[in-house]
Amino acid sequence: MNNISPRDAFWNKVYELAQKDKDIVIVTADMGAPSLDKFRKNLSTQFVNVGIAEQNAVTLASGLTLAGKKVFIYAIAPFISLRCLEQIRVENAIIKIPITIVGVGVGFGYEDSGPTHHLIEDVAIMRSMPNIRINNVTDNILAEYFADKCCQKKTVTDYIRLDRLSHSDIYNSKYDFSSGLAVAKKAKDYYIISSGTMVPVALKAAENLSKNKIDIGVIDIFNLPINERKLISLLKGVKKIITLEEHFLTGGLGSAIAEVLCDNSLLIPHKRLGIALEKGYCYKYGGREIIRKYYGIDQESVVIEINKFIRRKK
């Protein structure tokens, strides 16, 4: 287990690069983090707090970008993505001004703050617009990779999905992330396809299923749009796939994978595990695992559903 969260790993890397590159600017919507304290104190001319005004953060960031800056905006994930959706659509998707949008606490990251702070719609919304790349952070190594990449010159807006909690690293610093996806666990016949905070759940489920002599692998999709050519090559000869996400099924990762299968005439049985619209928003309290259990995406429920799907003959 890491001592710091992906959020702090991300901002620590940005800070390291910003010390040498004065064009890197942080615009925050009244958000704090241990890793941001260094910015506020030591790089004050590269740090702007707009207050609880996420729409203003997007517009300010877009203006600074036109002036040659490399701008990151940061807030709680549902507010930095959904509250300022019109600004993102107009300034970043339509006008194509490339900023970096950083949201912390995706999915049920703010577990006991209730449905206003849960974010289970953003992938569907963000991937419906051009010129926006979704970056789903799985561990600290990937967080640092995205931080470094977003500090370079670019032509699209990056949307970074960060978790609040610490996780064990899945990758090492030498891993090549350029394809936008990775095989976290290799297999021949079956794969769970997941991303972000659900990849550890997928890996544990795969480990559990292996005890029942089911050899199932895990593919981590950390960039959307999907690298279709790479994914198709990985799925060659695979018998069945399962997608797993902490997101509404409508428009999410499972939908994106289904589109790839359909558009490329790949006849692979596909089971989507995620949040059904009819379950609605969750008002249960007691932690993330309780909420996941309510939606049937906790590790135990996932193992049961995958077992049934794989053993089904048709």
Image (spheres, rainbow, N blue to C red):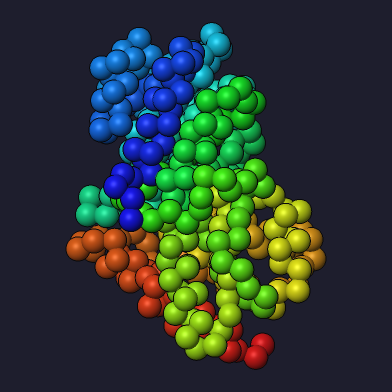
Q: Position of residue 182 (x, y in %)?
A: 60, 55
Name the residue at the right extreme. 265
Left or right of residue 24: residue 98: right
Q: Position of residue 215 (x, y in %)?
A: 58, 80
Q: Quadrant of the C terminus?
A: bottom right
Q: Identify the residue at horizontal 29%, vertical 23% (top origin).
A: 38
Q: Is residue 35 visible?
A: yes
Q: Nearer the viewer, residue 22 or 311?
A: 22
Q: Identify the residue at horizontal 52%, vertical 31% (top origin).
A: 148
Q: Identify the residue at horizontal 42%, vertical 66% (top origin).
A: 201
- Image mark count: 0
Left or right of residue 75: residue 85: right
Q: Position of residue 124 (x, y in %)?
A: 53, 49
Q: Is residue 48 visible?
A: no
Q: Position of residue 145 (x, y in %)?
A: 52, 39
Asked which quadrant contains residue 302, the reply is bottom left
Asked which quadrant contains residue 178, the reply is top right
Vertical side of 45 occupied by 266: above or below: below
Q: Nearer the viewer, residue 177 or 191?
A: 177
Q: Quadrant of the N terminus?
A: bottom left
Q: Identify the residue at horizontal 50%, vertical 65% (top origin).
A: 244
